Image: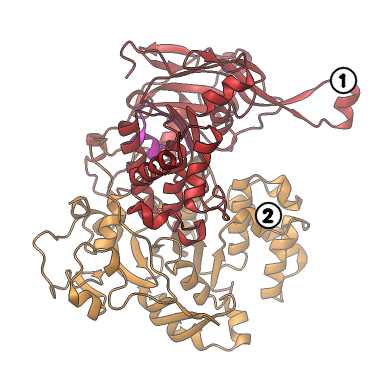
Amino acid sequence: MSLKIEDLKVYYCMRRGDCRAVEDVTFEIEKGDAVGLVGESGCGKSTVAFAILRMLPSPGEIMGGHIYFEGEDIATMDDDAIREFRWTQIAMVFQGAMNALNPILRVSDQITEAMLKHNRELSKDEAIEKTRELFKLVGMDPDRINHYPFEFSGGMKQRAMIVMALACDPKFLIADEPTTALDVTVQAQIMQLLRRLSDELGITLMLITHDLSVVAETCRNVIIMYAGKIVETGAVVEIFQKPWHPYAQGLIASIPSIERSRDQTLASIPGSPPNLLDPPQGCRFHPRCKFARDLCIKEDPVLLEVSPGHKAACHLATGKIKDSKWRPGKEVALL
Amino acid sequence: MSNGQEPIVSCRGLRKWFPVSAGFFSQLMGGEVWLKAVDGVDLDIYPEELYCLAGESGCGKTTTGKLLIGLLEPTDGIVEFEGHDLNEISRGGLRTLRARMQTIFQDPYSSLNPRLSLYDTVSEPLRLNKIATSGEDEEARVIRALEAVQLVPPEEFTFRYPHELSGGQRQRVAIARAIVVNPAFIVADEPVSMLDVSIRSEILNLLENIRREFHIAYIYVTHDLSVASYIGDKIAIMYLGKIMEKGTIKEVIHNAVHPYSQALISAVPSPDPTVDRKRKILPGEPGSPINTPPGCLFAPRCEYAQDKCRQDEPPLEEVSPGHWVSCWFPREPLQISYDLAHELKAKAKT
């Protein structure tokens, strides 16, 4: 077991009240796995990533739960320990690579900085040599390490960000929306690169995205979040073919595809995600759910196994309520 | 779609070159440097047709959309709207025509004036174009437009402000504002790319319903080929200001022959994990539209490029009725069909 998260709660405590961004999130990621964490904007997926690295922007705070990485609890580590741990064990490729590099520093300086901070035995020359090696690994010309970010195209900046994440040989890589703002052809290149890194270097990959198609192509397992909670998780092949949770069903049936027959209409989920300052009682999806009953308002469904390795948090899935129209599968969303 | 009808919008040899501030050396040489955003585009859009313009960023798709609606003046070429040449027409005439063509922009968070209530936002085009005959008529038209975009009951929305609305609702307001004047032609520039996945399909279905109900022709600018194949009738794939391949969705997306279209299509991720598309990953990124090389613009990235491609520019030729390709050596069609994709392939993904 590489990463194990238990009952994680992250709130952003503001004067207006607490924004309950992540609530009771529990999941495990096996070593060497490629997992997609998906959901709409504001569902808490990036917050989970920042919590894992203990880099929550203020006023975000871990209010409870555990984050075990190879047995150690990150949530309770002291600041010195976390500084040692961050980047050498778990590293992250940030969202918006276009703006994540410092425009007035050479790319090599930015990358070697991370290496030298985390490994005091490394000399500057060794760090530069390693940067050149990593540039080769991600398919870039090593002679470009001394260029400035403005001399790089979007795809190259993203590759440089990946090099920076790999600088200290992490075992676990979080990629937060690594391809938004990139063209499809470049997106395909970057995703292929991440897949290759995960295969060749044995790095565990957690991919955060709102694009389910990217997850379908890249990941083995998927975690679907809605309004700060996990609604469904399991193997990609299984969930994309037979989603159980009405939200997952709607989401999967709403993605256009060039292989889809044009006669099939896309499903849509009416309404919009709730305000997490005051989330709905019971199941957080009930105001948008066409199967919602009284029980859904009263009782929050727990994430339970519906088939081996496949969990869903819905009263329909666990059989607590019955509806003749509901069954596993994305077609349900079109009824 | 074109059954004997005249196109509602058409353009011939459309060009838009932007001057680039040249460096010291080129100024000395007296040469002017141009960014060729759109370079020789021919399109015909028929009534009630949805024509997609697709390509990577910087391919000139948005600029083409703006030219077709008269928001930019072309450097060269003709744009005709319902038979009127937009360049020849008087200012007053253009104003009347403008009411027949509208736009929907990408970002509903910045395209709506935060200080105007929805009523003011939606009724503004009516007032500007002096369409409503009376106050009651204006109100009735606004209500009808809000109903058409399913902001119901409309009375509840008329006096709200944009900050009270979600992204999807804002985009509905933008659509209502576009359709309130009864346009015949709408340019929609990536109208769903800023929206969340679960909202996106709702807006796509709405655009489709409105097209049928109000008989509107669209130019739909997008970088997302899966959206284009869902909503479009025809598509033009652009690269550095030129059309590489155009025709019906069936021809261009499901039987592409241009190496660039093929590469673009095979890069689109599939939401079905059992689909194993034979991926061709196109290396590199689009070149610069400034000082473009002679010959085919795609040649530097094309794995099949030959000497001829680097010397002579291929003309846009009709390879089968309605299917146009600009390539010296078109490939065998890349067939992507629903059935083919669903030949389930046991994949080591589990």
Magenta region: B217-233
Identify the secondary structure beneath mark 2.
helix
Q: Which chain is red?
A: B
Residue type at the position of mark 1:
Gly
In which chain is the residue bearing label 2?
A
In the image, taking residue A226 as reference, residue A292 lies left or right, namely left
In the image, taking residue A269 as reference, residue A276 lies left or right, namely right
Percent x, y for residue A329? 19, 56
Quarter residue B298 falls in: top right
Along the line of sight, the residue nearer the viewer: B90 or B210: B90
Quarter residue A308 falls in: bottom left
In which chain is the residue bearing label 1?
B
* Mark 1 residue crowding within 10 angstroms, few (<14) / some (14–19) / many (20+): few
Can residue B74 be found in the magenta stretch?
no
Percent x, y for residue A261? 25, 36
Say which mark, if any, is on residue B144: none
Q: Are marks 1 and 2 on the same chain?
A: no
Using the image, determine if residue A184 lies above or below residue A206. Answer: above
Q: Which chain is orange?
A: A
Whole-angstrom CA distance, mark 1 to mark 2, is 42 Å
Say which mark, if any, is on residue B30: 1
